[in-house]
Amino acid sequence: MDSPDSDGLLAEQLLRLTRRLQRIQSRQMEPIGITPAQFRLLRTVAHYDGPPRMADLAQRLDVVPRAVTSLVDALEASGRVRRAPDPDSRRVVRIEITDEGRATLRSLRDARRAAAEEILAPLTADQREVLGGLLSALVAGMPERRC
């Protein structure tokens, strides 16, 4: 499977699988009332040791600050995050995850596991282990992304 045609087929299969996984995850996120972009931001906020600045989130997510503002607005309206003043600078706003946000993350982790199980259902345990090793090798060879 070293020909350009087989590489193209492999790339197409990976894209189809990715799209399928995204559709399944979106379907499972809908009842929770969160978009994939909001989930990504919520997950990013949760990974910080303390409440991050909006600018930190924009940089980490590799988006413009305005995109973070819109996502934070929606998450704040749903009670999943709150804006907090920075103790050292009145101009800086920090984003704190709320208990509701943590509960949402737990629900979404369960939804992600269910989506993965749906995708991986045709594979045996041994095949899953091999696939995991192959995916780890691919991820390790990628340029670093923070989220």
Image: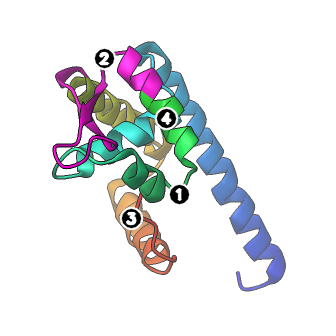
The first of marks 2 and 3 along the sequence is: 2
Q: Is residue 37 magenta?
A: no
Foreground tag (2 vs 4): 4
User: Which sits earlier in the primary sequence, circle 1 or circle 4?
Assistant: 1
Disc 3 residue type (three-letter): Gly
Decide which of 102, 30 is in the foreground and name it.
Answer: 102
Q: How many marks?
A: 4
Q: Quadrant of the N terminus?
A: bottom right
N-term-proximal mark, 3 vs 1: 1
Which residue corresponds to mark 1?
Answer: 62
Q: Nearer the viewer, mark 1 or mark 4?
A: 4
Q: Which residue is mark 4?
A: 69
Residue corresponding to mark 3: 132
Q: Residue 80: x percent and y percent? A: 30, 23
Residue flagged by tag 2: what amino acid is it? Gly
Q: Residue at horizontal 49%, vertical 35%?
A: 69
Range shown magenta: 73-100
Q: Which residue is mark 2?
A: 79
Quarter in which the C terminus is drawn: bottom left
Q: Evaluate if marks 2 and 4 touch, with contact meaning CB atoms under 8 Å apart.
A: no
